Image (cartoon, helix red, strand yellow):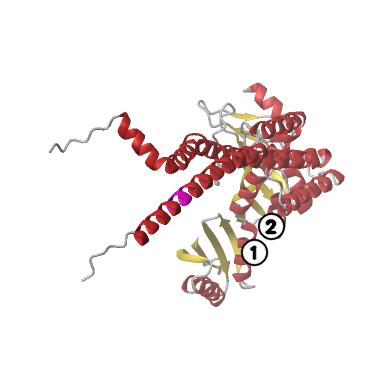
Amino acid sequence: MSNKTRIDQEVLKILYYRYKDYVLPLAAFIASWLIFLQVVLPQIQNFLSVKDQVTASEQTLAVMTQNYNIIAAANSTELQTFLNTAQKALPPTKDFAGVLNAISTAAGLSGVIVNDYSFQIGDLTNNNTKGLSEQPSIELNITLNGTMDQTKKFLNALEKQLPLSEVTSVDFVSDGTAAIDAHFFYSPLPKINFVDTDPIPVLTAAEKKMLQSFNNSLANENSTPAITPLPTPTIILRVNPTPTIPISPVAPIGSASANQL
Amino acid sequence: MQREINLLPRKNTSFLQREQTVTFARIAAIFSVVIVITSFIGVILLGRNYSVTDVESQQANVRSRLQLVQNKTIQQLTLLERTKKIESLLKKRISLTDKITFFQKQIPSNVTIETMTVSPLQVNISVSSTSLTALQSFLDSLTSLVTQKKVLKKLTIDNVIVSQQTGLYSVNVKGTFL
């Protein structure tokens, strides 16, 4: 007896007639799941990726819209005023006129007499002059005539003047003179790159208050002119060779010194 | 022993089982087809709600509006940059006025300050008096600042000078701030 099973047309016919009730449902079942795997599943995956993309784009759009709203709502006049004040507080370049004005005003407010002062300008072509706070600054040595209390008043007044400064040493002598080392800060403006998808921060209330107080001190300064005329400064350059150039008087210092050098 | 075999009940059972299986297969097939069609339509309908192109066109619109206020934006960013730097400077800045006032208060009334040099790190004071007790009181007050670890961490008395002509005692002290 042969064990071989022969599958021919007759056998298939028999099998078909025997199982024909199952064939159609089975074919439909297999076909539908094949379609699901081949067509519907990729569409679902595509849909999910598009959904993620749209969500991300909507978030970016929200940031952009918020940026636009912030800028559109900002008061142009106030913005310009604050910017001017901030640039006076921390100028982008060495503001000699501002420095002299600050000394003159502080002297006027405190009642001291400015005897002598000298700038340690540093290299005018280089912005790497560092103050104590790792911040570019103009170093200034001032000699004052006044009592200790007047000197303290001068220091207090100088602290409130613009450009911002830091007194790094006070040498007080009982004969009524004081030698002061001060650093007047400046900071070159960095290149501003605006990426519209990055949120624009807004000034906090404390920052606005600070700028407003600077504004007020500037307004006071303008309303009460400095009463102490300053003597001729000595400018000391930290470049080779190191010249000591006396120049006069206050107003042309920024331009004259730069031109001479 | 019963030799007759009743085949009818088993035949019926087999027939019923086949009917059940066919019914199950049909239900499964219909269920599968319904699921596939429903999910296909569902995905198409949901996909209509999410259009990247729409969002991109809105972005382009906002971007063009931002371009119109570009100068104002740069001003705002510059202002923020300056303000942050100013804030950082003000935080780091040390006021020497308070330190001078503090040391002024330590000096007794019959002691005179000859010189006082104050920097953020140290103070150097030269004082004179006709009274050694007054100078002692001044030195005690400074020493207590070191022992109590207030204001000063180190105190050095550089020299004590007595002037026979004027009768003045002079002391020079150097203190290092905490």
> Mark 2, chain letter?
A
Q: Do the CB atoms of the residues marked 2 and 1 lie less than 8 Å apart? A: yes
Q: Is residue B108 above or below residue A145?
A: below
Secondary structure, mark 1, is helix
B139 to the left or right of A69 = left
Q: Residue furthest bottom?
A: B133
Q: Main secondary structure of the magenta part?
A: helix
> Mark 1, chain letter?
B
Q: Amino acid at mark 1?
A: Thr
Task: Give the x, y percent position of residue A152.
Answer: 69, 57
Task: Give the x, y percent position of residue A127.
Answer: 57, 32
- In the image, which residues are magenta? B21-25
Closer to us: A124 or A232: A124
Q: Which residue is mark 2?
A: A152
Residue B101 numbered mark, or none = 1
Closer to us: B165 or B7: B7
Closer to us: B119 or A223: A223
Quick one: label 2, few (<14), some, or many (20+) residues within 10 Å? many
- Identify the residue at image location x=82%, y=38%: A76
Secondary structure, mark 2, is helix
Labels 2 and 1 positioned on one and the same chain:
no
Q: Is residue B173 above or below residue A233?
A: below
Task: Give the x, y percent position of residue B7.
Answer: 32, 59
Task: Give the x, y percent position of residue B13.
Answer: 38, 59
Q: Residue furthest left?
A: A1
Q: Amino acid at mark 2?
A: Lys
> How far apart are the alpha carbons under marks 2 and 1?
8 Å
Q: Residue furthest right?
A: A223
Closer to us: A3 or A231: A3
Quick one: label 1, few (<14), some, or many (20+) residues within 10 Å? few
Q: Is residue B52 above or below residue A22?
A: above
